[in-house]
Image (cartoon, rainbow, N blue to C red):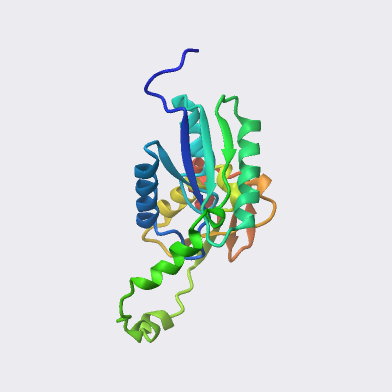
Amino acid sequence: MPERDDVPQRALVLVVRPTPSGVDERSLAAVVRAVAAETGGPVLAAHLDQGEPSVHDVLDRLDADGTGTAVLVPLALPDDRYLASWLGKAVANWRETRAGALEVRMARGPAAGAGLAAAIARLADDTAPITASPAGFRSPSWSVLDVPDRHLFVCRGPRCTAHGAGPVHRALADLVRGTTTKVTPAGCFGPCNLGPLVIDHPGGAWHQNLGPDGAAELLDRP
């Protein structure tokens, strides 16, 4: 197949692994824009787990666009061996389950970059006073135990995310809005090859291989 002039031959994918508080998507988008301005080529963001778009989503998009090579950058400081290790496994799964022609390579983490230590040290030259109030630690709203009648925990580990946990999470969250049921994303439960997995409390049932179309049926179960 001849190469199209409008298709980039290389794209950078900045892959993040959220903290328990999530990822600041605006800051991530700013980093993507800054790197794109530096390289002059396409730069995208992907989430190893917990968020979207997933690594599989982004690789599917690049492959469909005819991009030649995707270079994945595990974006964490300090370097996160879990991120790099599971990123490699996610790519291996993508290759096994797709028939795409996209070449995928991995860059070293940012801690290996030349000049990083000096750049961090220079941050101390641009400071601002801390003016935050301690009232947030005393707020009465954080002292109320609001126990839901039903609590669904959705696995958002790397494997369940690759298997489609994102759409399942969104479907459940949309369906329970305004009810006494709560939906919470969680880290890996273990048997994620059976995923997407949802643990249903207080009953304790484990729902396997759940798709977004099955969300309403799950909620109808006692």
Q: Nearer the viewer, residue 98 or 75?
A: 75
Quadrant housing the C terminus: bottom right
- x%, y% of residue 94? 60, 35
**Outermost right residue:** 191
Indicate left or right for 169 with 93 as reference: left
Residue 183 versus residue 133: which sits nearer the camera? 133
8 and 168: which is toward the camera: 8
Q: Is residue 76 visible?
A: yes
Residue 58, horizontal then vertical, whole percent? 48, 38
In terms of image quadrants, where is residue 4?
A: top left
Residue 185 image point, x, y percent: 52, 58
What residue is shown at x 37% (from left), y 37% (from top)?
40
Q: Residue at x 35, y 47 (%)?
A: 33
In the orientation shown, which residue stands out farthest toward the top?
A: 1
Number of disc labels = 0
Tell me if residue 197 can be seen.
Answer: no
Which residue does the image show at 42% across and 41% down from the upper left? 43
Q: Quadrant of residue 80?
A: bottom right
- 67 in relation to 134, above or below: above
In percent of the image, x 51 and y 27: which residue is there? 68
Q: Is residue 197 above or below residue 136?
A: above
| Camera-nearest residue between 54 and 177 | 54
Pinpoint residue 221: horizontal percent, then vertical percent: 55, 53
**From what the image shows, is residue 200 above or below residue 106?**
below
